[in-house]
Image (tube, helix red, strand yellow):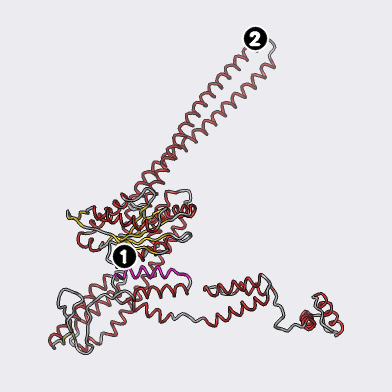
Amino acid sequence: MAPPGNPSEIAREALRQLALRRVPPTPEHYRTLYNEIAGLTAEDEPVPEAFLRTLARQLPRDSTERLRLARAFDQAVAARDDAAARDALAQYFAALGRETQPAWNELIAQLLRQWEARHAGWTTARKRESLERVLSAADPNTLYSRLQSLIRSWSQTPAEASPTAAGTEAITATAAADDSPATLVAPRLLAAGEAGELVDALRELLSRTLKEVVPASLAEQPELVREAATLAERIDAAASLEQLRQFGELLRRFALKLEMAAGDAAEVRSGLLNLLRLLLANIDELVLDDQWLHGQVEVLRQVIDKPTNLRLIDDAERRLKEVIYKQSQLKHNLSEAQQTIKAMIAGFVDQLAQFAETTGSYHDTIGQCAQKIAAARDITEIGHVLDEVMRETRNIQQRAASSRNELLAAQQRVQQAEARIAALQAELDEASRLVSHDPLTGALNRRGLEEMFDKEAARAARRQSSLCIALLDLDNFKKLNDTYGHQSGDDALVHLARVVRENLRPQDSVARYGGEEFILLYPDTELTEAATALTRLQRALTTTFFLADNKKVFITFSAGVTRWVPGEPLEHAVARADAAMYRAKQSGKNRVEIAAS
């Protein structure tokens, strides 16, 4: 007899077999008999859908491959396809077996080697900035790949030529054959007298470091300062090379204490910054209606969100002082106008009270007159009562007219005060808005750039038009500062910003991004057109001389430009433009490089 094929018949037969075999009717026994009648094995037994959905939610999706396989499993569960679900789950577990953990130890070792190596065009500050951008990745796999790319870019950069010390057993010295840092002469052995002089010089250098350099950075660590002074005195008193060698362990311990002190200071600084962030967040929530405070809060937030920079802090302090002074004057006038309104409201309440008192007296007088009229026996008595009624009516009429005039005058004064308050509030908001502009160059600052980018990006997405972003950096800016002073450097930035504004279209925007870097927004502009506009800007800058100490100085800039990809944040586009700008600098400066989107 063939097994029944209809699920209803299989279920009916399973119940009949339970009764015939006198087996307890438990779910397990029913499932066993059902599979036996249907001809199903344990592998063919369907898995409960609730279990599959729970399993699908628990699957890790922390990589692209895992996400793809987990989605395939989700689709199979949603379609109730057990075979497809088994296949997808098997592929997922097979992929887990194939995955290998990233070699973080080797990667970190490579990072340290490349960090310490000297690369042309890669200063320590630039390396730190690039590394901080890479470390912003939240996904470990993404972080690993970005670190690999960063290390690869460093390793592919030519190394800077620098003098090297040779000789491991004998004391050696090197001397340059000419002014070129790349030209070195072979090391020579030092004579015994010269070796002694070198040891004395090194001992003096170490002692001066412990006495002068170390205390300068340990103002809040008096115990370490005293220990450094004691160590320096013992080094000065050493009479032989063997005694100097004995200080190696003491120096190592002292260096460890310095490292721990630096770590504690960094933690304290980080804790203070976190407290300031919490305070700013609280202020933001408490003053939602006071738009004039948002500018100051945003400036402080920009300072604490960036690496500590003394020039950035000084710049923010100067801008805040200017805005706070102006806002304090406006706030004083605003408070006076508000006090005027309060006084007017109090006067209005007094007028209402007096009017209510007058009308109450009039009501009582009319009541008394009504009683007199009712009690009058002849017309002559009524005449006197009517005279009194007319007199009281005229009084209340005059009082009402006077109150009306006073209320109209108060209303006019209130309207004038409200207009004054609105004007002062607008001035306060405008003063806060000025915080979104760089006070030195007049260009937008980071806050203004973000607001303008949000506006232009929304317009570009709505119109499906092109938006290009360029990052330009003044060439040889450090050399200009060192040669002519920081004031000339600031004047050069002002000169560059003025030339840029004169050559931009009305719809274009320029913002100071930091230091000598500027961001340009080109709406409704294709990538090649933006590059052409930057080249024209370079020519315009070269035709306009800049004077430093009454000397004509030729200043240029290097730039990178990219097209904004709809939906991406500003930082991603700026990173591409930044990489293109550095390629332009490495290619000879005063160039424009295009970065693919």
Judged left or right of residue 421, residue 588 is left
Pick the quarter of the image with the C terminus.
bottom left
Image quadrant where residue 184 sits: bottom left
Q: Is residue 278 visible?
A: yes
Residue in the picture at 35% in, 78% down: 112
Q: Could you classify mark 1 by the number of other residues whose Cα lies within 10 Å: few (under 14), some (14-19), or many (20 or more)?
A: many
Q: Is residue 508 above or below residue 275?
A: above
At numbered mark 1, what does the secondary structure look like: helix, strand or loop? helix
How many numbered callouts? 2
Give whichever of discs 2 and 1 has the lower sequence position.
2
At numbered mark 2, what does the secondary structure look like: helix, strand or loop? helix
The residue at which mark 1 appears reads as: 584
Judged left or right of residue 374, residue 178 is left
The residue at which mark 2 appears reads as: 380
Expressed as whole percent of the image width and height from the top left, the position of residue 104 reads 43, 79
Magenta range is 121-138
User: Mark 1 belongs to which amino acid?
Assistant: Ala
Q: Nearer the viewer, residue 72 or 42?
A: 72
Give the overall secondary structure of the magenta segment: helix
